Amino acid sequence: MLTVKNIDLFYGASQALWDVSLSAAQGAVTCILGRNGVGKTSLLRAVAGQQQTKGGQILLADEDISHLPPHARSRRGIAYVPQGREIFPLLTVAENLRTGFAPLKKSERTIPGEIFELFPVLYEMMGRRGGDLSGGQQQQLAIARALVTRPKLLILDEPTEGIQPSIIKDIERVIALLRDRGDMAILLVEQYFEFARDLADRFAVMDRGEIVLSGSRDEMVESDVRRHLTV
């Protein structure tokens, strides 16, 4: 579904990504691991179109989207759940979900019933403001809003950050269900190693803006990966 080929990314004169290549398959979770500040979020922002790359290509289902703006990538099926969730705190849960209608045709602007099967707590809170939800509930809302867009590629940036263990388990279950459904690719950045290890079909470890280890779940050597996660 996603192929990233030899991209570089700069913030002014500072280079954040160096010749990065990556792929994410439909029906699989590809997990990016690494310490803080090694370029993980920059890579996700590059895929979502929020940061322009230099050189290389980003392909979605074999279409070159390297120079498309974020809204055009969203219309083609990319949904991005950023670190920190970025829900609208003054809008209700229902209104937050409806912001996911933006890239959809008018005939598709409905909230799929499966959203409330995946996140039943949101159905009970449709009239509450997003800012009144707990951190874990806000994370569920952010993922649900992304799913409203019917993505082909779901991008998740540290979905377990600052969340209580019970909701981490709920989010892990949802990601596994979405993967097993087989109609989307999932690209996940995570620092919680056990969460990533249990979900990942493929993994890539970043250090200083480069991918230094990658492979399938069966090829993962835990000690090598952990070495790149410790400070």
Image (cartoon, helix red, strand yellow):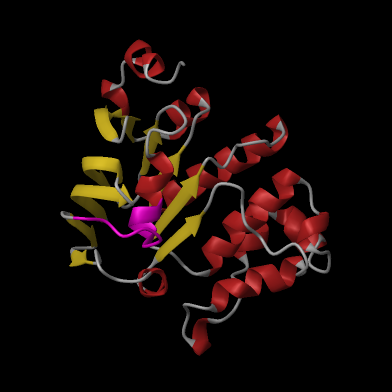
Q: Which residue lies furthest to the bottom in this view?
A: 106
Count of number-bearing discs: 0
Q: Does the magenta stretch include residue 91?
A: no
Q: Which residue is drawn at 44% across and 52% down?
A: 155
Reply above or below: 49 against 186: below
Q: Residue at x 35, y 71 (%)?
A: 69
Q: Is residue 51 magenta?
A: yes
Q: Quadrant of residue 122?
A: bottom right
Residue 37 or residue 217, whichever sits in front: 37
What stretch of residues is rendered in magenta? 45-54
Q: Is any part of residue 186 visible from this angle?
A: no
The percent coordinates of residue 31 (x first, y second) are: 39, 37
The percent coordinates of residue 47 (x first, y second) are: 34, 56
Reply above or below: 76 against 66: below
User: In the visual, does 171 lie left or right of 157?
Assistant: right
Q: Is any part of residue 78 visible from this angle?
A: yes
The percent coordinates of residue 164 (x first, y second) are: 72, 33
Reply above or below: 71 against 135: below
